[in-house]
Amino acid sequence: MSHDAEESSGSGDGSGASVGRGDGADGPDWRPIFGHDEPYDDQIDGIETAVETAREGGFLALEGACGTGKTMLALTAGIHLVRDPDSTYERVFVLTSVKQQLRQFEEDLRTINGNLPDDWHPISAMTLVGKADVCPYNLAGAGGIDETNVYERCEGLRERTRGLTDETTADSLAAQARSQQVGLGDSGSGASYLEAASEPTPYPREMPEAGDSGVEYCPFYAQYLADLPEDGDPVEAVPFDPTELGLIESEDLVQLSAGHGACPHSVMGALLPHVEVLVGNYYHAFGESAHPGSPGTEGGTGRTNTRRAAA
Ligand code: SF4
């Protein structure tokens, strides 16, 4: 998580101590990032305190009533640091256990992007989602995958797909699944393309099989493996240009990845190190046990979650 965790934990020890040092108080102005016309005085104070605290590798606990603009405050301060070429912060990592707060961060990101100066790239952002949210088979209720088995089945399919690449290439596995689809169309039996998020994919609804013993595999994963560079950054396997997309929503991820034939969840993983803002649940950072009320975790109140929002 590089500096993200440091950003929210604000460690003053060795790892966090290097963050944001040396960039001074007179860095670029944060105001173009702030999504509304005029910040409240308390927001100005909060943003400047958050920026200053982060530059010093410190913690900031912020408390405020609903509707006082804490979300915009946290995003503005965090994005300002990430965009400041003199700061070493790389990413804002928002963690919340409350869906409504997650949606508020998304909403404020859209507002920020909608009001940035014309010559600025939009703030790249993504909400972390689980396989159940983006697996084309699960979304379509196809391939023997549903909400109850998507994680387990996916792991098995991925393992078998990797195993098959000992005998053949990932590229040919994906191509084989595409040709099964073409074959169906040619035979006049009526091609039935798997559709996900209203986007047709190049594969049939049934899970394809390969090899003499008919091993089931996932063609979306095969395509992702085929697109991965041998050396180099996995982002090269992302089948679309995220630069101008701003907030990448799960529907975009599914349409743009599965439409090309690649696994949306794998594509999400390749994109993670390249977006400026990640929005996720506690368990994305701390594992499934990190639910409100779990020992060692913080509760799910608005106050706690705002503290957790990177600034
Ligand atoms: S690899 Fe991707 S597309 Fe294939 S089953 Fe898993 S989540 Fe679904």
Image: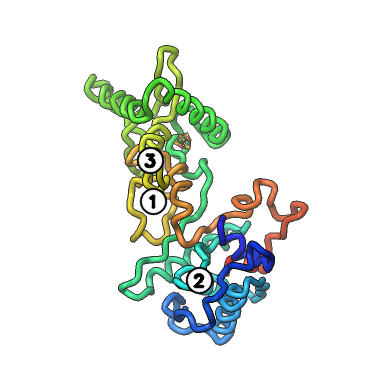
Earlier sequence position, callout 1 versus callout 2 = 2
**Ligand 1 under 8 Å from disc 2 Cβ:** no
- Mark 1 vs mark 2, foreground winner is 2
Give me the disc on residue 229. 3
Name the quadrant containing residue 124. Answer: bottom left
Please give left or right for residue 157 compared with residue 304 in the image.
left
Mark 2 or mark 3, which has the lower sequence index? Answer: 2
Q: Is residue 138 left or right of residue 45?
A: left
Which residue type does callout 1 highlight? Answer: Asp
Is residue 67 visible from the viewing direction of this image?
Answer: no
Nearer the observer, 105 or 235? 235
Q: At x 53% / y 34%, what residue is drawn?
A: 150
Image coordinates for residue 148, horizontal then vertical, percent: 57, 34
Image-based side of 252 in relation to 297, left or right: left
Local SS, label 1: helix
- Give the Cα distance between marks 1 and 3: 23 Å
User: How would you rate the neighbour count of disc 3 (Cα within 10 Å): few for under 14, some for 14-19, many for 20 or more?
Assistant: few
**Is 131 positioned to the left or the right of 296 in the image?**
left
Mark carried by residue 87: 2
Instruction: Name the residue at 34% across, 45% down.
Output: 239
Expressed as whole percent of the image width and height from the top left, the position of residue 111 reads 43, 70
